[in-house]
Image (spheres, rainbow, N blue to C red):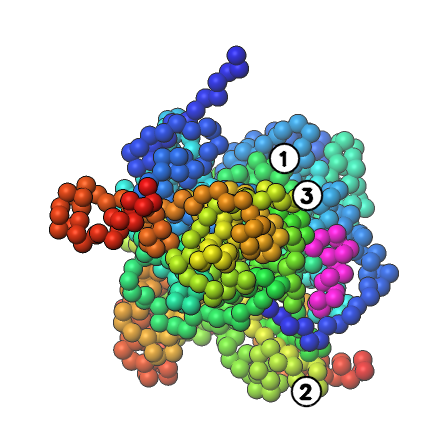
Amino acid sequence: MADEIQKFKVSIDGITIEVDPGTTILNAARKIGGDIVPPAMCYYSKLEGSGGKCRTCLVKVSKGSEKDPRPMPKLVASCRTTVMDGMEVMNITSPEVLDARKGVVEMLLINHPLDCPVCDQAGECKLQDLSYEHGTEQTRYEFERRSFERIDIGDKIQLHMNRCILCYRCVYTANQLTGKREHGIIYRGDHAEISTFIENALDNDFIGNVIDVCPVGALTDKTFRFKNRVWFTKPVDAHRDCPSCSGKVTLWYKGTDVIRVTGRKDEYDEVDEFICNTCRFEKKHTDDWVLEHPTDVSDQSVIASNHYHAFNPPPVIKEDAQLKEANIEQLARSEKLK
Amino acid sequence: MGRKLLLEHIHVPGINTLAVYREKGGYRAVEKALKTMSPDDVLEEVKKSGLRGRGGAGFPTGMKWSFLAKPEGVPRYLVCNGDESEPGTFKDRFLMTHIPHALIEGMIVSSYALGAKTSYIYIRGEMMPQIRIIENAIQEAKAAGLLGKNILGSGYDLEIYVQPGGGAYICGEETALLESLEGKRGNPRIKPPFPAVAGLYGCPTVVNNVESIAAVVPIVNDGGEEYAKIGIERSTGTKLISASGNLVKPGVYEIEMGLPVEEFIYSDEYCGGIANGKKLKAVVAGGSSVPILPANLITKTIQGNPRLMTYESLADGGFVSGTAMGSGGFIAFDEDQCIVRNTWNYTRFYRHESCGQCSPCREGTGWMEKLLYRIETGTGNLEDIDLLWDIQRRIEGNTICPLGDAAAWPVAAAIRHFRDEFEWHIMNPQEAQTRNYGLAQYADPLEPVVS
Amino acid sequence: MLSVKENLIVDFSADLLKKFAEVVSRYPEGKQKSALLPLLHLVQEEYGWLSVDAMDKVALFLNIQPIEVYEVATFYTMFLLQPQGKYLLEICRTGPCCLVGAERIMQHIENKLGVKEGEVTPDGLFSWRGVECLAACGFGPVLQIGPAYTFYENLTEESVDKLINELKEKAKTEA
């Protein structure tokens, strides 16, 4: 029998878990799940080299390892720091971490246009989620925000640089999926921008994935532009026999129309598998697809607020005549869906 | 007179040529190291010398070298950091201009100690004249058999190449420098892995400052113990100090570690006092990133002891009342200088030089610059001072590389020591446009020099 | 995004390509991208600035994507993406130089040349810009002029006037 790989024991906010050596703190936390998972805006597990930049996932390492228990002198990016055996990490139990994170959120927002009411990403925007959870209500920034022209990079993708948080995910995606990258980060510092530099259309067959990896509304699907708010749409998992990709997608329905196709995303908003442009942009009829089941949407998500899920009344409603009366419509529908 | 190890022959005509440099004892260290010492012997001497990195961080050079991974069949690199860009620092330009062979000699000995067969000297692109000088010196050394195959019959091969930068302060950070040397944007890498394990092209690499490498020459010639006799405590040897600002004799000085700061400023051997008979207001002692100190705290520590030019003494008092040796960029401010304007200027610099990877640095430096500009031009509010404090606090320590810290510290120190000047600026916006705040309570303890 | 109005079409000379090859030989096999910065300097020395066409041809030479060149050329401040005056005066504007009057010198140059920072004089001879620390703080104020990056130290209003006049004369004799 092969030797068993020795596991590393790590504790995050007091919860202990054993993971393989080489696992990052963030991925160890994701194994535990729940509130102790640090938010991540730039890290993307499917993209090699991503992470470390946005600084939202900073955590405190209060004990380095069993061998060397000294704490790390600074907060570390949990997405790029690997665990050591006996490491103790503080995330939501450390006021220092929460304060730093609040600072990072503020920095990410000072030049963000906050144009959520007209942004297609609203409802599935990681920056929105991040600021609700970790930000403050008021801004202390009193200067003009950085602004750029909107640019079409090709006829299917729109770049709205004002909203970009420079996570570099789309650059890694183009590098690792297409082999011939045509866009990148140009200039530097707070003038840095995502760009093709010269007017250029991104036309690689997998380039549409930059839309899925973008955590904000900087890269959006032009075929979906202003079609609908995501919370009025109903996601359904489907597949097709595609010669170039896995063909496993999520279809976003408005009534009987497929108004958008995306990759299937997990609870950390990462796609399971990247899909090709044909599946994403060309196949917008139910006939093109084999439907599987409604997409599992978290109850926390605004998408679920469209009573998309079966109504699961807590026992108190079912028992209390008054509440039962008040919820009669929902109860009737939940009966039907059973 | 203090001992001079690097600049001893600076005034000898023709010292920039190989012939004169050798006449004055140059390349003895190469002969000694390659013919009589093993690479580990050289490393041992550097360790014994107590030499600390002269680029700013002050990390012991011998220890850095000993971390170098040595896997079989993988090349190792020595990269010299000549991307001198820290405001207030110009010693490396000086050294490379006048004694280029000191750097080449140091490179040969250091490469030998590290087992590097190819080494690069990364010089900032603006120093095109220095790049030509160093390239020329390499050609001279090569023609004399001091570089190339089988150096001096020792069997050791080495090639040295010069790489120009393109105008980016951040490339002075060692991993950004390596990225730049690989032909990429100068974005610092996330560590670990450290360059000692995976540096240039993923191979084990040591990155050392120009002055550190040049200092290896006297260490090999005279032995590490001899070098360590100079200086105090963990600050051994001599250090090049770039003196600028309102001084009678600004320039590059080689000092023995442990020289009192007061002597450095006022003695005729060094800076000769404050220019135009004015009084000293403040000093930035180690390049723009280190905390600024008012005159009364730079010459004496908070306990009233004389402050010395050593890593420890300059840092005495921590960030509350101390500063740091940094890269040795000594900037003196006279009574007419405005701390608010200077802080704005530095912050604009850091904003301009931020690579833009990490959100706190990318966004925070710009925000601080806008606030400081507003205060400087007379439209600031008193709350801006606290806001500045809060922003710098949230940048510091929260970024991939130390540029975030370097941008935060000058703002923090300026507010800590000169808050009254900031407040005066805000409360007297009109007057602040026409005159400076002056000395306030930070009067120079000495009589002005009459020259 | 840059909308390319003035794209200089270039054809690298045999001499320049020879220099390129020498630079590439400094790096290990397959690491030719390392030559990017030195090559861009060489191109800029030849043409005065970096046109998109020039950058594309460098990319072709190094077998990398054009965007990789744009990313680098826009990151480093020395690379000029627009044509400049024949002489680009780059004056250090950082702290230590300002302590000894760099801001006054910049104002003087603006008045003397009659153009704002980044603009070119009508005769096409001069443009100027403030740059960050040039590592010559003890000899400030300082300015440099490419492509050789000739250095002028301890500037005064008089020495700047003299320099500008000399450059004008030089341009005349060269014309």
Separation (CA) of disc 1 from disc 3:
10 Å
Q: Position of residue B145 (x, y in %)?
A: 79, 41
Taking the spot 50% from the left edge, 64% from the top edge, the residue there is A225
Mark 1 and mark 3 residues within 8 Å of each other at the beta carbon: no
Instruction: Check disc 2: other Cα within 10 Å, few if <14, some if 14-19, many if 20+.
Output: few
B34 and A270: which one is in front?
Answer: A270
Question: Where residue B288 sits: x, y (%)?
Answer: 45, 60
- Residue A133 left/right relative to C76: left
Q: Which residue is mark 1?
A: B114
Residue B175 place in picture, x, y as percent:
56, 47
In the structure shown, which secondary structural element does the residue marked by tag 1 occupy?
helix
Range of the magenta residues?
Answer: C50-65
Cα separation, mark 1 vs mark 2, equals 56 Å
Instruction: Indicate whether residue C68 is drawn in magenta.
Output: no
Q: Disc 2 marks which residue?
A: C122
Query: Is residue B387 visible in the rendered structure shown here?
Result: yes
Residue type highlighted by circle 2: Pro
Q: Which mark is residue B119?
A: 3
The local secondary structure at tag 2 comes to: loop
* Residue in view at x 47 percent, y 29 percent: A21
Which of the two discs, 1 and 3, labels the residue nearer the N terminus?
Answer: 1
